[in-house]
Amino acid sequence: MRLGREMHLVARPARLIPEAGDVRLIEVPVPDPKPGEVLVRNLYMSIDPGALMHMKDLSALDIPHFATDTAMWCDAVGEVIESADEDLKAGDIVWHRLGWRDYAVASATRFRRVDAGAYPSLTHHLCFGIVAYIGIELAGIRPGDTVLVSSAVGGVGSIAGQIARLRGASKVIGSVGSARKVAYAKETLRYDAAFDHHDEDFRLQDDIDVYFDSVGGRQLEAAIDAMRPRGRIVVCGQTEQLHSGVPNGPRNMMTLVRKRLGLQAYYTFDHPDLVPKFEEEFPQWVRSGDLVVAETVVHGLENGVDAAVGQMRGEYVGKVVLRL
Ligand SMILES: NC(=O)c1ccc[n+]([C@@H]2O[C@H](COP(=O)([O-])OP(=O)(O)OC[C@H]3O[C@@H](n4cnc5c(N)ncnc54)[C@H](OP(=O)(O)O)[C@@H]3O)[C@@H](O)[C@H]2O)c1
């Protein structure tokens, strides 16, 4: 009998950071696939803010959360090692949402075969290119735009800034959480400028046409003040509120009205229409080197929760991926 490990949520953390005992790595028997099912050995899984968020009870927000005493889940890439399905074959590389476990056994319909050669690395199938791509499409970049990106070297932000440039922005500015990240944004991701949002009383020096917002709160407030009239704000996340647990909205919403700013929030799954265009353009940008997929790879399922906490604390650059 094959055995595999799964990360279970045992108790909902009282605070953002789970305590010892809230999660447990357990060993379980891995069943053989039944007709129509496949057995997948996971190779990589995504570490993202969702890991800590889904540990909470999110019923009031109408967002799914982890059940207790069952395996947690997240995006993952793995290899089919046994198949009882007509379509998927042993050796196929698949993307799916049954991460946080060594092996996934489920209906073949829950796995999507990917082209293993589409990117220089299998990890790139987990990057948040699609999230960034949709946000930048919704923003409608015009040649010459000045674009501000928050969490600018994070999983989503590191790609959003680069796509804005590819779409014709003339100046791309990154907001990040450390001096090391300022250097990374400018040297590796080719941002024109970057600043540390921890600097007390930071002021945006530029007039902004587009703000790509992942964090909300204080940075959204500063962006609204710096926007040009009729500028566009796209909101993909609210990390500041997620992390502090305290609503900390902008206090200058009247400025939003006065400047006639557009503000659009989105979930990636709202825009399946943009996926074919993304799949055509994005791998080409990566393969040609026009776009750098920034990432940090951590190792070992047992280190996954610490990695999620480290990511939230801003310890990594790029998309955080765990090698199982
Ligand atoms: N709408 C969608 O469909 C969708 C899909 C996926 C993800 N998202 C959202 O996109 C956002 C980014 O996700 P990601 O995976 O790319 O994460 P990420 O940006 O790689 O990591 C989170 C980053 O947030 C920053 N941060 C932490 N605490 C902060 C605070 N109090 N104030 C401001 N910044 C803080 C840190 O970067 P610094 O060190 O630079 O501050 C940290 O590294 C998240 O809000 C996530 O929920 C949305």
Image: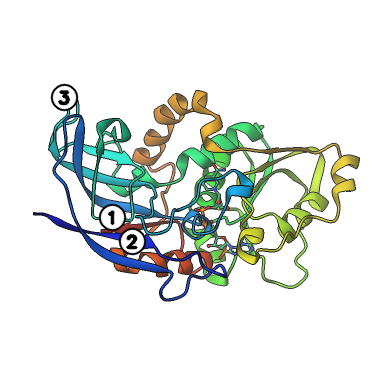
The quadrant holding residue 47 is: bottom left
Say what amino acid the circle numbered 2 marks: Met
Whether residues under marks 3 and 1 lie with C-beta atoms below 8 angstroms apart, the answer is no
Q: Determine the residue positioned at 49% across, 27% down.
A: 272
Confirm whether residue 238 shows in the render: yes
Report the Cα–Cα distance between label 2 and label 1.
6 Å
Q: Nearer the viewer, residue 263 or 161?
A: 263
Give the residue pinned by disc 1. 101
Visible residue check, residue 121: no
First in sequence: mark 2 or mark 1?
A: 2
Q: Could you tell me which residue is drawn at 40 percent across and 66 percent down?
A: 305
Q: Quadrant of the C terminus?
A: bottom left
Q: Residues within 10 Å of mark 2 (few under 14, many from 20)?
A: many
Determine the CA span between mark 3 and mark 2. 30 Å
Element assignment for label 1: loop
* Residue located beneath label 2 in the image: 7
Q: In the image, ligand 1 is in what quadrant?
A: bottom right
What x and y, as percent, mark residue 54? 50, 54
Residue at the extreme front of the image, as rendered: 69
Amino acid marked by disc 3: Glu
Is disc 1 surrounded by few (<14), some (14 to 19) or many (20+) residues within 10 Å?
Answer: many
Spot occupied by residue 309 in the image (x, y as percentages of width and height): 47, 68
Is the residue marked by circle 3 packed among few (<14), some (14-19), or many (20+) residues within 10 Å? few
Image location of residue 75, percent across then percent down: 38, 47
- Quadrant placement of the N terminus: bottom left
The foreground one among 280 and 307 is 307
Task: Say left or right for 221 vs 91.
Answer: right
Residue 51 percent coordinates (x, y): 46, 57
The secondary element bearing badge 2 is classed as: strand
Please state if 125 lies on the left or on the right of 241 as rendered: left
- The residue carrying mark 3 is 86
